[in-house]
């Protein structure tokens, strides 16, 4: 990946709806080489996809919590079962496996505290291998959906 590829990625992170012609103009390339580089970045997996960034409040999901998960055991079967089950919970927006304690950090969004409690009690606490859940509520998102640095 060279400096031009990084410029293309930077521009697309700022505006994923750019046409190839607009992108080429912004990075100062002609359209054909820009298009070729774009397709190469997609094939190589540097660009994983294109999507709309939706405001959670606009769709009624403005209650956000971080849930820390500690597993009873960390054998391969338990980890796999937990990860597959947590991936199937739609309100889990992000799930990250951590080094040390706790084992996982989940970012979840619901409509309100009551919906969060139901999600916590009915889905999260029943995930395979869970020993302990600890949660904290998000007061405010200070940095969200930031583009990756060059």
Image: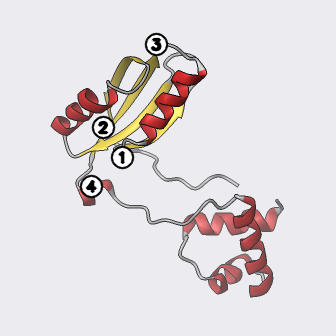
Q: What residue is shown with label 3?
A: 72
Whole-number angstrom distance, CA of label 3 to CA of label 4: 35 Å
Q: Quadrant of the N terminus?
A: bottom right
Compare residues 66 and 7 and report the one nearer the observer: 66
Of the image marks 2 and 1, the number of the one nearer the N terminus: 1
User: Is 125 displayed left or right of 96 in the figure?
Assistant: left
Q: CA distance from mark 3 to mark 2?
A: 30 Å
- The location of residue 7, given as percent across then percent down, is 72, 67
Depth check, front residue: 121 or 29: 121
Q: What is the distance, in whole Å, between disc 3 and disc 1 at their CAs?
A: 24 Å
The residue shown at (46%, 17%) is 71
Q: Which residue is mark 2?
A: 139
Picture colour scheme: secondary structure
Judged by depth in the image, the label closer to the viewer, 3 or 4, is 3
Q: Is residue 105 above or below residue 109?
A: above
Q: Earlier in the sequence, mark 3 or mark 4?
A: 4
Of mark 3 and mark 1, the one earlier in the sequence is 3
- Residue receiving disc 1: 90
Of badges 2 and 1, the one in the foreground is 1
Q: Earlier in the sequence, mark 4 or mark 1?
A: 4
Q: Residue at x 43, y 34 (%)?
A: 106
Q: Is residue 4 above or below residue 97?
A: below
| Labels 3 & 2 near each other (Cβ < 8 A) | no
Residue under numbered circle 4: 57
> Which type of secondary structure does the marked residue at label 4 adopt?
helix
């Amino acid at each position: 990946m060279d400096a031009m590829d990084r410029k293309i990625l930077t521009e697309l992170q700022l505006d994923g709806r750019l046409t190839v012609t607009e992108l080429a103009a912004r990075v100062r390339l002609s359209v054909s080489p820009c298009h070729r580089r774009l397709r190469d970045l997609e094939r190589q997996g540097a660009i994983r996809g294109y999507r709309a960034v939706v405001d959670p409040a606009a769709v009624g999901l403005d209650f956000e919590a971080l849930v820390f998960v500690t597993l009873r055991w960390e054998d391969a079967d338990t980890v796999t079962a937990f990860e597959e089950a947590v991936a199937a919970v739609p309100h889990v927006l992000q799930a990250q496996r951590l080094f040390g304690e706790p084992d996982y950090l989940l970012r979840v969004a619901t409509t309100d505290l009551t919906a969060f409690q139901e999600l916590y009690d009915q889905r999260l606490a029943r995930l395979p291998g869970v020993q302990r859940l600890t949660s904290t509520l998000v007061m405010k998102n200070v940095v969200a959906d930031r583009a990756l640095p060059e």
